[in-house]
Structures are given as structure tokens and as C-alpha cells.
Amino acid sequence: MREVAIVAFGQSDHVRDSAETSEVEMLMPVLHDVLAQTGLAARDIDFTCSGSSDYLAGRAFSFTMALDGVGAWPPISESHVEMDGAWALYEAWVKILTGEAETALVYAYGKSSPGDLREVLTRQLDPYYVAPLWPDSVALAALQAQALIDAGLTDARALAGIAARSRAAAGSNPHAQLRGEVPAGEVLVAPLRTGDCPPIGDGAAAVVLAAGDTARRLVDRPAWIRGLDHRIEAHSLGVRDLTDSPSTRLAAERAGAFELPHGLDGTGGAPMVDTVELHAPFTSQEVVLRRALKLDAPDSTVCINPSGGALAANPVMAAGLIRLGEAAARIHRGASDRALAHATSGPCLQQNLVAVLEGER
Amino acid sequence: MPEVLTAPLVVEFPFTRSLGPVQSAFLTGLRERTVLGVTASDGRVVVPPTEYDPVTAEEVRELVEVGTGGTVTTWAWNPSPRRGQPLTTPFAWVLVRLDGADTALLHALDAPGPDAVRTGMRVRVRWAAERTGAITDIACFEPDDSAADDGRPAAHSGEFADAVTGITVPARLDYTYSPGRTQSRYLRALTDHRIVGERCPSCRKVYVPPRGACPTCGVATDTQVEVGPRGTVTTFCIVNIKAKNLDIEVPYVYAHIALDGADLALHARIGGIPYDRVRMGLRVEPVWTEGGRFPDHYRPTGEPDADYAGYKELI
């Protein structure tokens, strides 16, 4: 099996409203950043894959406009997913594993400011039974939060604690939209308060992937992707146990998250990872993910969302890719040896992707 | 005047969808005040019904009739109803397991306040006065004290007179479109009857309309350059089909026009000349109508045709 690593990560500053810059204007500095980190030019990249959504832009084929920022001449090998960029990374990873490419550029962007994000996200729901009722994204997350409270798995205080920890961690993240002390705020859809919900904002992110010795040549400490898997659950919320995330657990198992580290000093199996980047846009979803990933051991030293996570910046379509990038960046700079990154999509954690990343010692 | 232009953008579409046998039976049933579920491979009754088993993906077709009373499995209080939602006064979103069902249906609960709602409470369907065969035929749920019906649901043929076979669901999303700095400058210059392109610092090409990036080099275009207003037709087509709501007589000519000083042709309609006299190399200039924010069309300048060698790179 070919080894594949994330060798560079870049992101924009995430802001509430970026009306002054178009998508391509927002994206271009991020692309230049990751290329500069690796010393690669656009023509050196074998495969380019992006994630974005027409529903955010309000325009058909909106990703074609952003392609201007890549430099698509001479012609490039390119693909797009109408999903979070984490899934674009998955496609690029497969492309490299199969030997079709040696390097890949993956980028994602989303501007939520032009529309009403809570309404826009209703368009991903079942169009027959659910979407005609226009249940917004916060309402659906609130149903999940109440189910957790009813099951005795969390309470308002614990949720507020997750929000506070995330935004305090974001104090050292210059790209975050919300940092430091953020009040719990008003009830948005009970039991969720403003502080339990992600900020709405615009942003972009990019990573460069490379195989084996190419990765070693490009950077000092590649973040090797040891496993990557994604799983989906039933579309209908009413057939799922909203307090659990079996798709996250299964993806993590398949990605090798629960196995002993590769090439590292064995520690008897715990901790399996030292860093976790969870894509939990709502505080209550972190509770679900921690349970699914078995992160709640009483003596756990795992560092969860040192970037502040999606509660500090949630550029839709890029926030999942950023989790992979943040985890990889910690490995690049030696702050982590083995990290787990997670991305989600759909209402109430319907789809989940898990990657296990490692640095060489 | 702000640097960046913005304008309202409405995306609106009536989504027309056909229904399979199970969805058709369910939605027709709602019109007739009957709630149907489907029996899954493991014997569970799925409401609202799916056509494929959520666990095994096997086709499921065995319909049963479930109750119109049910139990709330989780809820969320919505103090500020939004456009399109089932109720205009504050309400609870609920997942309701109807009597006889093993899964829950998402809908709204009409309750006086959050203190009147709890998981496990009994509710029943409030039917809409006018029903068409849609999920909104359930107006909402309302609190109800009657005990759960513990009986097994009865088999149902799923057959109704005049079955609903499709639904049309209007959808509307409102945006505030902003084209960004570069295109705002272009649009603003147009109102002064000036056409502005931008030069790529790397390949030196001048793009019009500029979008802030050179699509060849992938770098920001940084220098504004006034181009035109005259230009050369590089290629064209004759349009013979009249577009809906377009007040232009056919046939007419649509052309690529290389404005003087630009390295990319833009496209526009050619007027002021019979359609069969338009040719490559024709020299044209923009025509603005009264109050127009962009050229209505381009017309011949009367100059001699441009030399092919002068524009062949721009075709």
C-alpha cells in the first residue's frame, strides 16, 4: 500500500461577512500559501479536487468560477464534490493510493453570508417528508441535544463548558471567527443557546497531499494518513438513535483509530491518539462524538480541538477539511505524533469521516 | 457610495417530484386522514414509510395503518418560527412515534410554551383543513391525554381512489449577491460607459470582464486597464430561436468581440446591420440605451474590417 501524507495546510481568516471578496479572491491566497509551503507550482500538481456548494453561492456550477484561482492552463486533472472538502480529500487520497497521482491539491470554500444558512441547509433534507416543513439546522441539532439530555448524557452546564473550552482554545488560532469569552447567549431553539451553535461565516482552506518519498522530499515531517474511512446513516432522523453515532465509530474502526499506533513506542494501547480534531458544529454533537470515539476515559490526556473546532469557525464546506488540516499541522510542527481528524455532513451527524494521521519519529 | 455592489438574488423553483408506490400511498393516505407505515425486514413498522429497508436496503412494500395518536421521543422549543415552517406562533419541533410504529416522524407540536412539552408526552395529529397529499396535510400535532393504542397495526392495501402520484414543492431562498471588489469596479465603470479590464502581472494578458484572477496563471489580476470601446468580431452565431421573455426579433447575431486592448473576447449581441452581413473581423462599438447599466448591443463602426492576423489569437 502506498503511503500518503498531508504535507501542507492553509486557511483563510474566517469572517462573518466577506462581501468585498468573491469566492476566487478569498480562495487564491490560501492556494498560494499551500503551494509555497511545498515549493510546488500549480503545474506540478497531478490532481486537484475541491468541495463547495451551489446552494451557498445561490448559483449553478459555482465551483467553475473558483477554478480561475488554480491556474487551469495547461489543462489539469480536476474533480469536484458538492460536499465538505474532507470528502474531496478522500477522493484525492484514493487517486494517489491507486497510483494515478503522486501529488494532489485539495481545497474547499464556502460563503454563508449571502444567504440565510439555516434555510439553505434545509435543502439537503428528504424532499418528500421533511424539507417541506423547513426545519432549520439549529432545530434539528436541538432535537438531538434534547435526546442527549433526556438520556442523562449531558446537561446545559456541560454543553456550556464545551463551548467555553472550544473558544478559549481558539485564542491561539489567528484564523478563528470567535475567540475567548463568549457568553452563552439567548435560547435559539431550546435547549440550544447561541453559544452552543457555530458562528455563521465565510472561509476557505487547502491542503497538499503527496505520496511516499515525494512527501519526505517536500517537508520535514509529513502527516501520514494511516487510515481514512467514511460512513453514512439513514436519511430519516426518526429511524436513528440520535444519542449515538455508529457511523463515526465504524469509520474510526476502519481507519484504525482503535488499533495500536504504527511505528511508535507502544504504550499498551492508551492513549491511542494524542490529538483529536472533531467537526462538531454544535456542543451537543461533541458529546455524541466523544462517546462514539471512546474519548471519555477519566484519565484521558487527549487534546480535543486545540484549534477551537467548528464552534470557533465553521465555514460550511471547508470546516471538515480544516479539521484534517489542523490535525496535520500539529504533526508537521511536532506538537502531535498521532492524531484523529473527523468531518461531518448532513443533519445530526448523518455522515462521518475519520482519518488517523501520524508523524514519523 | 460603498466600494462593493450588492443586489438581492432570489432563487425560486417549484420542485416537481414523482412518488414511488410507498410514498404515493403514504401521502394519499394523509389526504384521507389515514397514516400508513411499512413493515421492515425485521418486523419493525417504519413511519413515515420508506421504499427500502433502512437496515438491509431490501425493497419493502407491506403497508400497515398506524394510529393518529403518538408519543414524543424528543423535542425542541422554537421561539421564533421562520418562513415556511408549519406554525407561525412559537411551537415545538417534535419527533413522534405514532401508535403502532417503531420509528418517529418529524413535525411541529402546537403547545402554549416549553413548560407544556416533555419527552414521553402524548400527542395526536391535527389535520389541515385542506389536504392535497403532502406532509403538510398534517397541520401539526397537539397535546392529547388519551392512552396509547398498544394493538398491532392493521394491514392496509395502500389503495385509494385518485392516488397522488407526484408532489410540487415550492422552494425559495433569498440571497444578497455581491460580486466582490473586482467585478464591482467593472460594473461601476460600465455605468460611466467605460469598459475596464485587469492585467495579469504574470502573463500580461488583459481580462474583461475581470474576475480578480488570471485563470491561466492562478494569480490575482492587479492592474486596471481601460479597453475598447471599439472592438472586433472574432466569431459569431446566428440565433433563430426566440427566448422566452426576450424582446428581440429573430434571427439575430450573438458574437465574441475582442475589445481593443483586451486579450479575451467578451460576448454580446450585434445590431444595426442585417444578420447575414455580420462577419469575422467586423469592427463594432457599444450602444448604450437611455439609463442602461451595460451596453444593449454592439453596432458596426464603419471602419474597414480588421486584419485576420490581428485577432486570430483571440478566437
Image (tube, rainbow, N blue to C red):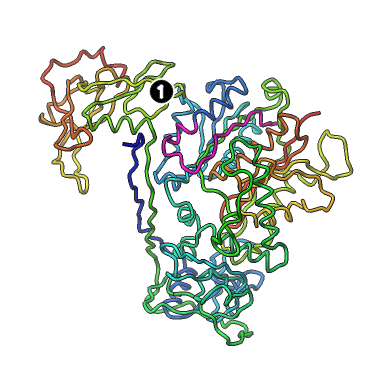
Q: Amino acid at mark 1?
A: Thr
Figure quadrant of residue B315? top left
Residue B145 visible in the picture:
yes
Residue A20 on the magenta span: yes
Residues in magenta, as a range: A1-27
Find disc 1 in the rendering and name its residue: B221
**Secondary element at image label 1:** loop
Examine the structure image and report whether residue B226 is included in the region drawn in magenta: no
Q: Is residue A238 above or below residue B242?
A: below
Q: Quadrant of residue A264?
A: top right
Q: Nearer the viewer, residue A89 or B85?
A: B85
Q: Position of residue A291 (x, y in %)?
A: 74, 56
Q: Is residue B93 above or below residue A99?
A: below
Q: Which residue is found at the position 47% from the left and 74% from the top?
A: B140
- Is B308 situated above or below A142? above
Front residue of B135 and B205: B205
Is residue B80 toward the left or the right of residue A272 in the image?
left
Q: Position of residue B73 (x, y in %)?
A: 62, 72
Q: Is residue B156 visible?
A: no
**The quarter of the displayed image where residue B133 is located:** bottom left
Point out residue B158 in the picture as x, y percentages from the top left corner. Answer: 48, 77
Q: Residue at x 58, y 87 (%)?
A: B146
In the rendered structure, the residue with mark 1 lies on which chain?
Answer: B
Question: Is the residue marked by circle 1 packed among few (<14), some (14-19), or many (20+) residues within 10 Å?
Answer: many
**Image point (56%, 21%), residue name:** A44
**Viewer-proximal residue among B111 and A101:** B111
User: Which quadrant of the figure contains the N terminus of chain B?
Assistant: top left
In the depicted structure, whether residue A216 falls above or below residue A240: above
The number of callouts visible is 1
Name which residue lies at 49% across and 55% down.
Answer: A118
x, y percent for residue A360: 78, 29
